Amino acid sequence: ELEVALKVVIVGNGGVGKSSMIQRYCKGTFTKDYKKTIGVDFLERQIEVDGEEVRLMLWDTAGQEEFDAITKAYYRGAQACVLAFSTVDRDSFEAAHSWKLKVENECGEIPTVIVQNKIDLIDQSVVNPEEADLLARALGCRLIRTSVKEDLNVVAVFRHLASKCLQE
Ligand code: GDP
Ligand code: MG
């Protein structure tokens, strides 16, 4: 039986929790200041979806997203995408559309999930629920609200993406 391997890119403004999400999902840990391990491009986790073994390779950026300097190598061959914004960062929400276009430019149409992270900070939210739903509808993607900190819904993000990819 052939094992399916999927390259997943995680995009969104700096500080929304991308590295934390990868670390949470692949290592089961959460820290206040996660620093990308030098020399490691991605972390991986194997799951079973619809009876198939899927190896997810989650690619992290080294923080260069703020400088619009993510290299083509980062996107090359990506088969799925997590587009993340933060509940407490309005700019990150406003930037979601342009991140979607950037991924489309580099990868074409690939299964994408919009992630609203830091839902544990909902009391300080700067994005109302209807806006987030509208964004997801406009971009034609599922919206999943997560808290990497509280380990809420992180597994669901990658399960959904893997399932989408297997259906294609
Ligand atoms: P990145 O720049 O998108 O990779 O973001 P990081 O993973 O470095 O996270 C930025 C900060 O947000 C760190 O201090 C994380 O601990 C914090 N963070 C990540 N996810 C959550 C979350 O779900 N809730 C809260 N409260 N903080 C989070
Ligand atoms: Mg990071």
Image (spheres, rainbow, N blue to C red):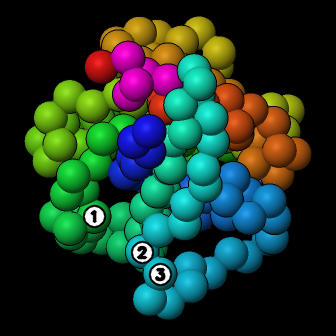
Q: Is mark 2 within 8 Å of ligand 2?
A: no
- Residue marked by disc 2: 41
x 50%, y 49%: residue: 55
- Hey, which quadrant is residue 20 in on the image? bottom right
Where residue 82 sits: x, y (%)? 46, 40
- Residue marked by disc 3: 40
Report the amino acid beneath label 1: Tyr
Disc 2, SS: loop
Asked whether, in this view, residue 108 is left or right of residue 130, the answer is left
Asked whether, in this view, residue 11 is left or right of residue 84, the answer is left
Asked whether, in this view, residue 10 is left or right of residue 69, the answer is right
- Hey, which quadrant is residue 81 in on the image? top left
Q: Nearer the viewer, residue 1 or 97?
A: 1
Q: Which residues are magenta?
A: 163-167
User: Decide: marks 1, 2 in contact (CB < 8 A)?
Assistant: no
What's the CA distance linking mark 1 and mark 2?
A: 9 Å
